[in-house]
Amino acid sequence: MSGDYAIGGMAFDGHVRGIAVVTTDLVGELQRRHQTWPVVSAALGRTVSAGAMMGMMMKSDRDRLTIQVRGDGPIGQIVVDADALGHVRGYVDNPAVDLPLNNQGKLDVAAAVGKGTLDVVKDLGLKEPYRGSVRLVSGELGDDFTYYLTVSEQVPSAVGVGVLVDRDATILHSGGFIIQMMPGAEESLITELEQRIQEAPPVTKQMEAGAGPEEMLFRILGEDFTIHHRQELAFRCHCSRERTEATLKSLGEEELTNLIEEQRKAEVICHFCNEAYQFSREELEFLREKVDGES
């Protein structure tokens, strides 16, 4: 049973939006499934928290988004899927990366991610998905999501995300917040909130001290913050044996024949959840017959 959740609400007469999440169980689930090493868990977990919060911003229950962090660092690509119902999944190209700590004595996420782009694809039920893309400004990911929301979506924002990894690679804490300025916010309010955000301890320090999403937002926005929405968060993958069969059928008769003759079986592993689907020779031959019949 996951204890992860997100909250969202408004402050200062609707001029400021706040969203915050705890994603400890979610990131722990991904760490177990993908066996991510600490610096990779930190990078994936920060992206998961941002994805969960951005999922909460979407208007329809059917809306979903995919985040792709494509850096030139050793972990390769980070991919996170989230929807408006709090379902999140994710993976990285290279889960086993070990780097020296950075000069602050912390996991060097920036070096692991490297330079590149942050892309967000939103499926809003329209003919074409919405696509936004920005360059990575730091690789620390909190700064990069701040830059994306401010530049690509044109909403002045501040994003704080953090993951605390134990010595045995398990996840102790993971979470984050997004503060956004709505149209009409006065410059003095923006300056005041920037100061409060700078003075707030890092997300994981707050969580270590027992803070949840509510406390993180009240610390920055004060008692004026009103919670409008609470959303449970959970890992969920869309893969299934039926979908995997459809993928194999899409290879076509010739490719299936090659697979049957050369491998005599097939194993298809889902990127997102690491679930392995096994197909015997007989099952592959049956799929080939179905392809032949449909054509």
Image: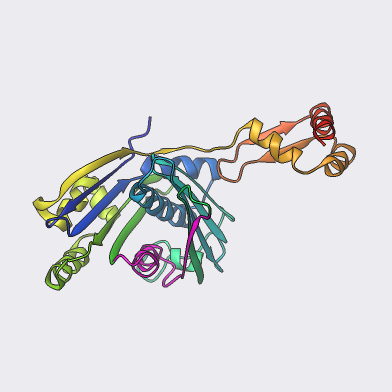
Q: Is residue 161 above or below residue 26?
A: below
245 sits to left or right of 295: left
Q: Is residue 3 above or below residue 205?
A: above
The colour scheme applied to this rendered structure is rainbow
* Count of numbered marks: 0
Measuring from the top left, give residue 291's x and y in whole percent. 80, 35
Whether residue 170 appears in this view of the structure is no
Measuring from the top left, give residue 44's x and y in whole percent. 46, 53
The image quarter in which residue 84 lies:
top left
Q: Which residue reaches farthest left?
A: 223
Q: Residue at x 28, y 67 (%)?
A: 156
Q: Which residue reaches farthest front?
A: 127
Q: Nearer the viewer, residue 92 or 287?
A: 287
Q: Is residue 70 above or below residue 230?
A: below
The image quarter in which residue 18 lies:
bottom left
Q: Nearer the viewer, residue 96 or 162?
A: 162
The image quarter in which residue 269 lies:
top right
Q: Answer whether residue 138 is magenta in the image.
A: yes
Whether residue 137 appears in this view of the structure is yes
Q: Is residue 131 above or below residue 41?
A: below
- Quadrant of image for the N terminus: top left
Q: Nearer the viewer, residue 128 or 221?
A: 128
228 sits to left or right of 173: left
Q: Residue at x 38, y 71 (%)?
A: 103
Q: Answer whether residue 75 is magenta in the image.
A: no
- Quadrant of image for the C terminus: top right
Q: Nearer the viewer, residue 161 or 31?
A: 161
258 sits to left or right of 75: right
Measuring from the top left, give residue 14's x and y in whole percent. 16, 55
Magenta segment range? 128-155
